[in-house]
Image: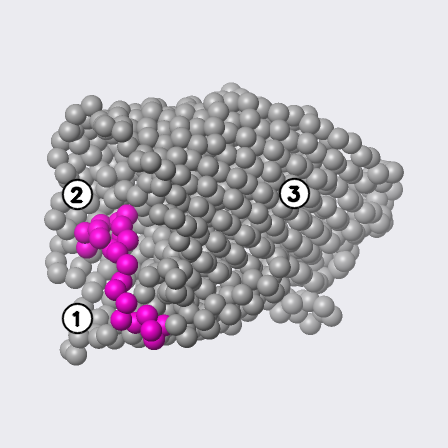
Amino acid sequence: MRRTIFGSAASVLALVAASGAAAQDASEGADSAAQAEPDEIIVTAERRSTSVQDTPLALSVLDGEALRQGGNQGLTELAQKVPSLSFAQSFGIAQIFIRGVGNNFFSPGGDPGVATYADGVYLSDQEATAVAFLDLERIEVLRGPQGALYGRNATGGAVNLVSAAPTDSFEGRVGVQLGDFGRVQGEAVLSGPLGGGVTARASVQYRRLGGFTRNELADTAGARERGDGEDSLAGRLQLAVPVGAGRLLLTATGYTQNDSGPALKILADPFPHPAELLFGVRPSADPRSFKSQGAENRREVWSVTGRLEQPVGGAELVVIADTRGSDRLITYDQDGTERSVSTTTLDTDSTQSSLEAYVQGTSGGLDWLAGATWLRFRQSRATLVDGVLPAAFLNPALPVTQPFPFAFAGGGTVTTEALAAYADGKLALSDTVALRLGGRYSDDDKRAREFLTFLAPTITGQQRDGWGEWSGKAGVDFTPSDDVLLYASVARGFKSGALNVGAFTPAVDPEINVTIEAGARLSGPGWTFNLTGYSSDYDDLQIVQVGPLSQILANAASAQIKGIELEASVKPAPGLTLGLSGSWMDAEFGSFISTDQRRGFQPFDVSGNRLPLTSRWQGTVSARYRADLAGGSQLDFNGAMQWRSEYFFTEFNTADARQGGFARFDLGAVWTSPDGGWAVNVFARNLTDRRVLSSLAVVSPLLGSVRVASLEPPRHFGIGIERRF
């Protein structure tokens, strides 16, 4: 499948290039974005094209070109630019949190609390988002429950990745970026007409990174020199075909990766790890190095999507059919020492098929949309751990220095069937007041086959559960003038229940989020000011806990979250744009007693503790200056400072799972030739080289309750050149 996609992309690149000369003089198609005002940003967050300042949502938009010129660090960019958002990546699996809600449970059977969509398709697999960051037009981040239009598993919000679309006129670009730590990145895009009204776009990207973290065991046979490396190839092919008065957009994507994977650093502890008890060796104490006798990270992702847009009377019918799959294998040194004490392998594969259809239109003062969706997602995971334990861990009568060989295998297969029907509408009561109402009913069914092997014959089992729940939103908009939008709403979000596959524990209840929100979107010549306040009540909040052998998902009784979010920009002088985004958030557990296996499995009342990965304060201050140079070229300077107050990785809010407050600085510049045909960019990230933990997970007590952490990249630089035509 991957070779077919990349081969097709290469063929279309050649075909579009051949037809480009004939298309150069063709009139450029005028889409909604091209017709917008010069500084207006058009979004599709409500499944309709609207100006961002006219959209009554807590909404942030990131520009795809700006991301590319700054090194495009994927979902990490969101945490640096979007209020109330944090991002973690445990074992290379993406985890987004908005307003304290997300999911740090990376086993099959659970779902994220922030829904991720790629061109209108829901992505169930958190391990398969990387390909979606190729050739993006923009990223839309919706904060708060999105239960009507974005459905289940959007209790915290939704991230909508929008790819650049085929164009009616010939255009393209070829670029390369180089940097320290062995960075090499190349990208090529061609887009234009093929004849007969058919347009196409082909995109290919190659990324290679030597790695940010030094391996102290690089001389060991089979060991990699560095961790956090990347070696990936991605491709996307799009064909837009006229169908009657509408069009059919066909998209195929492929992604392949084979590298060292994340540098999973074992943090030092005051009490000995198994490796120290057995052999007197410890993990590396150097923040930017680790010990790994071998690591492997292989990933294959593919997808095929068809999107039909067809006028039906005075309305429009949209049908989206999609199938996709992924295969991922990661192996890492679990003990982080020079002795072979523990090696872990996660072997995961998944397939997803989905079908969605909706109709949208206007009738008098009513702007309406109604639809239904079906999704089937199957994911299998086998977790394999091989190594030795201190014999005293299993029998206190034996010496702690005596190694006892063991093998652990656990996991299974989960199949999810999800059906939903939804409707959303806006009724204009007058020229200034409108009511909004949306609702969705979701019906989820999950079936699992699971297995577990540890010091005994293999245990197998099956479990099944289902949940039916409604979600939605009601609100009112007040638009006293073209530059002022005031809105208020109440929303109910639903996150599906979960199965702890391989743990042989009961199913986890769904979580429900009810949020009251009010906001203002104000704008004027050269400035925008957006402010949102919210209060959320959660029931049965799903949270990760550590069981005897593995992580499991459980329900906290409740949580309360409230906060304020701000996004503002101003142009105080010609060419200069200043920006500010930030948030204050108070996110606490309600009634919740949890058992901490790092403190002797004692129960602790964590009521009032802060939710994991939530900072009370976070924000970004940015500046951009555009200078017109002699001869007609332009030079853009940009800089940003991101800050966050402290946050914790577990519900216990203890110092051993804490990241202190920090500030980080990024700089960049882009030179563009007079005709726009050439661009040169440079960027520098994390200038002060601040060490920041991006994720931390506590593993099985039988492996010493070690803390496995990932760090954000250190200070790094890059320079790129791009030819546009």
Using the numbered discs, state the Cα–Cα distance from disc 2 to disc 1 in whole angstroms.
26 Å
Residue 245 at x, y percent in the picture: 35, 47
Q: Residue at x 50, y 34 (%)?
A: 373
- Where's the N terminus, which quadrant? bottom right
Name the residue type under label 1: Asp
Query: Does 34 appear in magenta?
Result: yes
Q: Which residues are magenta?
A: 20-42
**In the picture, residue 439 is in which quadrant?**
top left
Name the residue type under label 2: Ser
Q: Which residue is mark 3?
A: 379
Task: Name the one closer to the observer, 625 or 1.
Answer: 1
Principal SS element in the magenta part?
A: loop
Q: Residue at x 44, y 32 (%)?
A: 371
Q: Is 508 positioned to the left or the right of 51 in the image?
A: right
Task: Name the one closer to the observer, 124 or 604.
Answer: 124
Residue 118 at x, y percent in the picture: 46, 48
Residue 337 at x, y percent in the picture: 69, 58
**In the picture, residue 7 is in which quadrant?**
bottom right
Q: Which residue is mark 1?
A: 628
Using the numbered discs, state the Cα–Cα distance from disc 3 to disc 2 in whole angstroms.
46 Å
Which badge, 2 or 1, comes first in the chain's sequence? Answer: 2
Q: Which residue is mark 2?
A: 523
Which badge, 3 or 2, comes first in the chain's sequence? Answer: 3
Q: Is 516 positioned to the left or the right of 470 in the image?
A: left
Name the residue type under label 3: Gln
Question: Could one spot residue 323 in this view of the protein?
Answer: yes
Residue 330 at x, y percent in the picture: 66, 55
